[in-house]
């Protein structure tokens, strides 16, 4: 699908020189992750060694991938950059907005009706700006990317946390916010803290009921949901080479569940097989020519403890099939202990649903192994006790699985085949009876199982496992069923045992597809118009933010002094607001509604200094804006932690907040504020937080000499006529000060394009 072999060859052509430069500065053997990172420095050849976990480094990713929910704001922003085309190959994938209910065809038709304006917008903007567009029903972003775009040794960013899936094909692929995607598409560098490195040595070989999923379930059990934070996990060893490419994808995919920046595997024959079977023999040939660069230096794997910050060893031969959950993906229980654990903890043993799919486990191999269990059930006269739902990962997988009879096998077990889309994995599942909120158990092959994630019911106990184990457990209808040792009673009253799954790593007759659902962009998009209705409540074209007026700021009102934790979720809530992600004005009605007001301990209840009344935060701010008065938000420690959601910076900017002053920032949010042309400031003396009073009017002085490292001064005019002068710091570099002056980073890019 128009993967860019020339781009890939160019990346590989630079590898020799870039890795030689990296080797010189690092002065020791390089891991695979280091090779890929150093080969993608924005500045070209490395001139210094970066400190893992400390240095902030600019990178030049090769690709950008976006899903339909997050692409909206990324592309609305990109349109502001004034470029005729994206600077790097990019794709949009419509997979999040399709609800599973009746089955693929009906569900897809309904979704196309309900979200037509979003799909039309994404299609037209992709067409105009040179972006590959994957229509609703074409598949789940990460499966489609693995099948079409991922390549060994490449670097990609994507507006979805499971972008990391492409590590299965040897990439460094990282999930980011829309603002980062916009920057890279607009031709700007992408900044990342140089990650720490965790090595996972895999020995032995999988067998029987044990699947690649069990590897990552085990790793999650060891590292927990936070253990990978700020690190790249690099898998290696003979066990790694024995895994299929899509199996490696499964393992990398769930690296997101341990908080890892990404995970990756060195190039090997499984990747070559996958590339050739998915129509990319030329990529395989190009990769073979630079093979030595697409895996770590041999010394690294010989003495891994010397080169990784942390090392884990897993013997695949000793691994057990397992289930993680409920409510968290790191609670590891081998299948052999599940009955006991469930009884001890009061987890319902009766299983209501078995779901196979999601970007984690929806490959041909996954479906074929699960289908082998379904086939046995039919042949052995078993009737499935739980309901069954399948979301194939892509139209290519679906079409091929249909051709090879796999879907028919599932249907013979009364499974519902849902659209090739995220569906239940993202809560897009109209599950009958979920509103009754009954305590119940489901098993699925997805990655996340937080409360309410799949069906909105807080009492659904969701367990994550391999597709074949989902099939076995759904057939038995019992969470405690261990297919390795247990038997089931068939419709003739006989005891039968399921044999271990079998399956094909790749379809023996090759992949096939009639209409993959891809729309190539126009060669010249200049005459393409972008479809956004001015009356839409879901989409709104952005207006450039105004430039700085060139003076210090006087008479700002305190909007809210937030107390304690204030994450991007407190600043811009998700849930029902998701549907306004493409409409800045509408989504701004959630601005800071989750933040706790220091003065009354309430949320979304602040004093409007113009009226003296207490009201919602967004309404109060709109009042200030209407009166031409700027405002300031004050916050506590680590303000803006959580996701990289750019809306948390855009909403205050849109509604006229001029500065955010906090004890400390979460770095991504601080950068997002800077990109939007806002002032992100920190107290020089954290105790000055206590000097901020509810009725304060505030001046910001020193902006006319705004310079790196030079503090600014705030004058707090209190209601009793007294005033305090406090020093505030900032981390703006010269470039970021230009962003502030221009009213935002995109204004600068646009000016450059125009000039
Ligand atoms: Fe979609 Fe679930 Fe993956 S939402 S992208 S299938 S994690």
Image: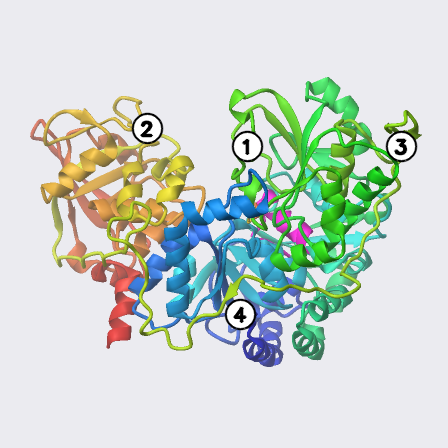
| Image location of residue 262, percent across then percent down | 59, 54
Numbered disc 2: secondary structure = loop
The residue carrying mark 1 is 455
Q: Residues within 10 Å of mark 4 (few under 14, many from 20)?
A: many
The residue carrying mark 2 is 596
The residue carrying mark 3 is 485
The residue carrying mark 4 is 40
Q: Earlier in the sequence, mark 2 or mark 3?
A: 3
Which residues lie in the magenta part?
249-263
Kindly report the secondary structure that dominates the magenta region of the rendered protein.
helix
Q: Earlier in the sequence, mark 1 or mark 4?
A: 4
CA gap, disc 2 and disc 3: 53 Å
> In the figure, residue 638 lies in which quadrant?
top left
Q: Residues within 10 Å of mark 1 (few under 14, many from 20)?
A: many
Q: Nearer the viewer, residue 58 or 602?
A: 602
- Look at discs 2 and 1 and give the one toward the viewer: 1
Numbered disc 1: secondary structure = loop
CA gap, disc 1 and disc 4: 41 Å
Q: Earlier in the sequence, mark 2 or mark 4?
A: 4
Q: Residues within 10 Å of mark 3 (few under 14, many from 20)?
A: few
Q: Nearer the viewer, residue 216 or 18?
A: 216
Asked whether residue 558 is in view, the answer is yes
| Placement of the N terminus among the 4 image quadrants | bottom right
Numbered disc 4: secondary structure = loop
- Look at discs 3 and 1 and give the one toward the viewer: 1
Q: Earlier in the sequence, mark 4 or mark 3?
A: 4
Would you say 693 lies left or right of 232 here?
left
CA gap, disc 2 and disc 1: 29 Å
CA gap, disc 4 and disc 3: 50 Å
Numbered disc 3: secondary structure = loop
């Amino acid at each position: 699908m128009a993967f860019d072999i020339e781009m890939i060859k160019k990346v590989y052509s630079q590898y020799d020189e870039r890795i030689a430069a990296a080797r010189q500065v690092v002065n020791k053997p390089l891991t695979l992750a280091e090779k890929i990172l150093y080969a993608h420095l924005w500045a070209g050849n490395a001139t210094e060694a970066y400190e893992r976990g400390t240095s902030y480094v600019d990178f030049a990713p090769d690709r950008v991938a976006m899903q339909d929910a997050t692409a909206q704001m990324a592309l609305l922003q990109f349109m502001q950059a004034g470029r005729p085309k994206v600077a790097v190959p990019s794709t949009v994938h419509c997979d999040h907005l399709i609800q599973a209910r009746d089955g693929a065809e009906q569900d897809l038709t309904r979704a196309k009706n309900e979200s037509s304006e979003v799909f039309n917008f994404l299609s037209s903007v992709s067409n105009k700006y040179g972006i590959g567009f994957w229509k609703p029903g074409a598949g789940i972003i990460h499966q489609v990317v693995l099948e079409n775009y991922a390549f060994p040794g490449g670097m990609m960013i994507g507006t979805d946390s499971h972008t990391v899936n492409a590590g299965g094909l040897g990439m460094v692929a990282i999930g980011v916010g829309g603002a980062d995607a916009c920057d890279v598409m607009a031709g700007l560098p992408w900044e990342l803290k140089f990650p720490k490195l965790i090595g996972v040595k895999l020995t032995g070989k999988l067998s029987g009921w044990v699947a690649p999923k069990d590897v990552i379930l085990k790793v999650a059990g060891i590292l927990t949901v936070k253990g990978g934070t700020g690190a790249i996990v690099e898998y290696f060893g003979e066990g790694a080479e024995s895994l299929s490419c899509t199996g490696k994808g499964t393992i990398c995919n769930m690296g997101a569940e341990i908080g890892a920046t990404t995970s990756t595997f060195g190039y090997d024959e499984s990747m070559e097989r996958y590339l050739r079977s998915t129509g990319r023999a030329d990529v395989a040939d190009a990769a073979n020519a630079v093979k030595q660069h697409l895996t770590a230096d041999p010394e690294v794997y010989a003495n891994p403890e010397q080169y990784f910050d942390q090392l884990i060893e897993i013997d695949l031969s000793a691994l057990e099939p397992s289930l993680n959950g409920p409510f968290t993906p790191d609670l590891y229980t081998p299948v052999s202990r599940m009955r006991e654990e469930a009884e001890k903890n009061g987890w319902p043993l009766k299983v209501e649903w078995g779901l196979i799919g999601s970007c984690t486990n929806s490959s041909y191999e996954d479906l074929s192994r699960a289908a082998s269990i379904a086939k046995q059930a039919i042949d052995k006269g078993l009737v499935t006790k739980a309901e069954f739902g399948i979301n194939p990962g892509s139209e290519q997988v679906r079409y091929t699985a249909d051709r090879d009879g796999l879907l028919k096998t599932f249907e013979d077990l009364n499974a519902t085949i849902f659209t090739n889309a995220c569906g239940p994995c993202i809560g897009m599942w109209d599950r009958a009876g979920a509103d009754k909120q009954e305590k119940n158990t489901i098993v699925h092959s997805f990655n996340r199982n937080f409360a309410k994630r799949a069906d909105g019911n807080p009492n659904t106990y969701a367990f994550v496992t391999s597709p074949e184990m989902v099939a076995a457990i759904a057939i038995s209808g019992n969470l405690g069923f261990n297919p390795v040792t247990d038997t089931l009673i068939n419709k003739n009253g006989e005891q039968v045992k399921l044999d271990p799954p079998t399956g094909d790593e790749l379809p023996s007759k090759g992949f096939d597809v009639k209409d993959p659902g891809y729309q190539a962009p126009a060669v010249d998009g200049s005459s393409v118009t972008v479809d956004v209705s001015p009356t839409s409540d879901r989409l709104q074209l952005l207006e450039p933010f105004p430039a700085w007026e060139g003076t210090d700021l006087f008479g700002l009102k305190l909007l809210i002094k937030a107390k304690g934790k204030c994450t991007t979720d407190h600043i811009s809530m998700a849930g029902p607001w998701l549907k306004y992600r493409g409409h800045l004005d509408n989504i701004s009605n959630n601005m800071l509604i989750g933040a706790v007001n220091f003065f009354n301990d309430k949320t979304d209840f602040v004093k409007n200094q113009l009226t003296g009344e207490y009201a919602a935060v967004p309404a109060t701010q709109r009042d200030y804006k209407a009166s031409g008065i700027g405002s300031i938000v004050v916050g506590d420690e680590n303000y803006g932690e959580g996701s990289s959601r750019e809306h948390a910076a855009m909403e205050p900017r849109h509604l006229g907040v001029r500065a955010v002053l906090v004890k400390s920032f979460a770095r991504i949010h601080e950068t997002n504020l800077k990109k939007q042309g806002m002032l992100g400031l920190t107290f020089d003396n954290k105790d000055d937080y206590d000097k901020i009073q509810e009725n304060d009017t505030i001046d910001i002085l020193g902006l006319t000499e705004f310079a790196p490292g030079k503090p600014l001064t705030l004058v707090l005019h209190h209601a009793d006529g007294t005033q305090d002068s406090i020093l505030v710091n900032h981390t703006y570099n010269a470039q970021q000060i230009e962003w502030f002056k221009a009213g935002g980073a995109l204004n600068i890019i646009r000016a450059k394009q125009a000039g």
